[in-house]
Image (spheres, rainbow, N blue to C red):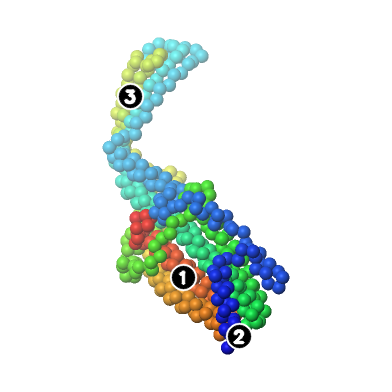
Amino acid sequence: MIALAVVAVCLTSLLPAASSPISRGDHVSGRSIPRPAPPASRLTADSLPTITLADALQRSVQLNPDYVRALGAVAEADWIRKASRLAFFIPAVTANIDLTKYSVPFFNLGTGAPVNTSVTATLAARYEIFSIRKFTELGRSQAELEFATATEVQRRFAAALLTESAYYAALADEELARVARDRASRAEQQLVVARARVQTGAAAPSDSLIVRLELLRARVTLLRDESALRVSRLELGRRVGVAGAVVPLPLDSAPAEALPLALDAAVAQALEQGPEYRAARARERAADKDLSGKRGGYLPTLTLDAAHVRFDSKFFPSAVNVSSLTFTLALPIWDNGRRELSIIQARATRDVARAVRSDLELAAQREVTEAYDGFETARAESGLALESRAVAIESYRVQEARYRAGATTVLELLQAQNDLSQAEATLVQSRFTARLALARLEAILGTRFNSSGGPS
């Protein structure tokens, strides 16, 4: 009893020192524990630019090459649709003028006499009165625009998913670095207590050696996590167009809410408005319209051609004006098999597009179920991790008190500390895993369930 009282008095006198980091190095058995240099991210975090998730999503999507390419495809498809509509009302018009210089006098239609110079100006217009190609091209261009629009939405969600992944990774690495710092701080405090117990004879010298080894491990883990934090901040900066590291602003740490729709409704919504499924259906319609246009090559076409020609020997020609109006009915008979080959190719393209669409729709239930259940599982794991951390905190508190009182071993104390650090790290990872799982489900459904500022 007297020995325990002496140990308690010694520990009480050492407690204030245990609350502050060791500043001169930890000397055990004549050796010093090296302290890691403060990492650059901790020294400059306050000076780094910060960004919200909504701003990151808005900025990064404009920098994604696939999304920029999809925007260009939408603009191209939109103009093709407008041109196919205009073809029903506006003829194709061509204007040209040419001047010819002869080496010897040549008969000129404008002057009616031999001259060395001939100037001809022509204005021609061509309008297809009847052609099946015009109607099929209108339908094909509309389907192509729908395909490009759906692809643009799909690329937007994909770009947002990459940005959210980088954003959550930076936040998670920041939290993991904090967990590592807490672990190192606890190990430093435990080393003070262990040395005091060894000096008073209440513990074997191996206790301080074991704690010293734990402190070294904690500091190495801290260096690793600080390095990962710097890299993830640089990756986030790249995503938002900043040449350097960017610090993400913290998000709400509340548990993820339940989804506002059931699994069956999610599958139906994916099939109806999911960008990937919309794009597949639009691609099939476009291929079908293109095949119909190729088959229309067997039908006759009725064309109206109008022309106005001027002849002279000087610029601008005005000596003779000739106008013409021509109706042409053409029936294609044989073009050495090129028409038939184009039909075969168009039919193969249509069949492939149909197979892709059918396969995607058959796989929709599996894809949506996987993403839906993945989010629900991540939510449950996050709740479990929160409870596990609470248990680990209490377990560590009890083991620390028991070790100070000499009622447990240092190995049990370190095991409780490791369990606490692991529980905190698991909670961090599970929380952001749930957020990323939700983002994946949103990309499949083509909608947002939160107000983070992503695609809508």
Q: Quadrant of the N terminus?
A: bottom right
Q: Nearer the viewer, mark 3 or mark 1?
A: 1
| In this view, 402 is above or below 215 | below
Is 32 positioned to the left or the right of 279 in the image? right
Residue sitting nearer the eye, 189 or 330: 189
Q: Give the number of the disc on residue 308.
A: 3
Q: CA distance from mark 2 to mark 3?
A: 120 Å
Picture residue at 36% right of the left edge, 49% below the top: 145
| Outermost right residue | 30
Helix or strand or loop: what does disc 1 sit on?
helix
Q: Residues within 10 Å of mark 2 (few under 14, many from 20)?
A: few
Q: Give the number of the disc on residue 3.
A: 2
Picture residue at 37% right of the left edge, 64% below the top: 361
Give the residue number, with chain letter if any, for mark 1. 427
* Tag 3 and tag 1, C-beta contact below 8 Å: no
Residue sitting nearer the eye, 403 or 103: 403
| In this view, 438 is above or below 293 | below
Between disc 2 and disc 3, whose residue precedes? 2
The kind of residue on which mark 3 rests is His
